Amino acid sequence: MSGYTAKQVAEILQQDDPRMNLRTVRYYTQIGMVPALELIGNKRVYTDRHIHFFRAIITLTRTGETLSSIQERLMSLSIEEIEKIGQQMYLYDPNRVLENETLTITEDVAITLSPRVSAELKQKVIDSVSHLLRGDKN
């Protein structure tokens, strides 16, 4: 288990979101957004588990959720679910959202395509997903 200082955590997270700084890391820790620090030896440190929490927080704030709703949500999830949320962070990159096209196929299914995808391929993807959702054999 790796141990990190708050400064190290901030530096790691700045690669994901430049707005994450030492002050934000400390604030999220202080208000209980992440679990209590781990005791390694005689020092209290952040671990990879904390990094997963921070990445999930970044992802969910990008969706527009409030800190209080994020905190409530994260408390009820397993570490695997929290890690999965953090892994989806790139989907909510503001630059990516603006450049890509998201198409809603059904209420439960949406696909996001790069502008580099040709109109022909885009239509094939839409048709294929629609057929799958309808349960068509072909």
Image (tube, helix red, strand yellow):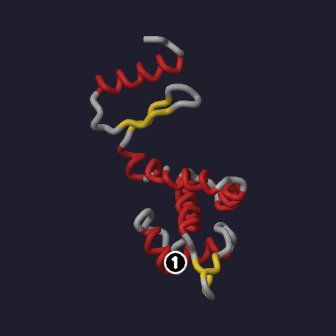
Residue type at tag 1: Tyr
> Residue, x 45% and y 31% (percent of image)?
103
Q: Position of residue 6 (x, y in %)?
A: 53, 79
Q: Is residue 138 above or below residue 128?
A: above
Q: Position of residue 110 (x, y in %)?
A: 50, 33
**Quarter of the image with the N terminus in it:** bottom right
Q: Which residue is mark 1?
A: 4
Q: Is residue 40 above or below residue 131?
A: below
Q: Position of residue 40 (x, y in %)?
A: 60, 81
> Residue, x 53% and y 77% (percent of image)?
3
Residue nearer the viewer, 114 or 85: 85
Residue nearer the viewer, 2 or 83: 2
Where disc 1 sits, the SS reads loop
Give the number of callouts.
Answer: 1
> Residue, x 68% and y 53% (percent of image)?
77
Q: Quadrant of residue 76?
A: bottom right
As drawn, is 55 to the left or to the right of 99? right
Q: Residue furthest bottom?
A: 42
Query: Tag 1: Cα neighbours inside 10 Å, few (<14), some, or many (≥20)?
Result: some
> Residue, x 49% and y 20% (percent of image)?
132
Q: Quadrant of residue 73?
A: bottom right
**Quarter of the image with the C terminus in it:** top left
Residue nearer the viewer, 26 or 97: 26
Q: Position of residue 69 (x, y in %)?
A: 69, 56
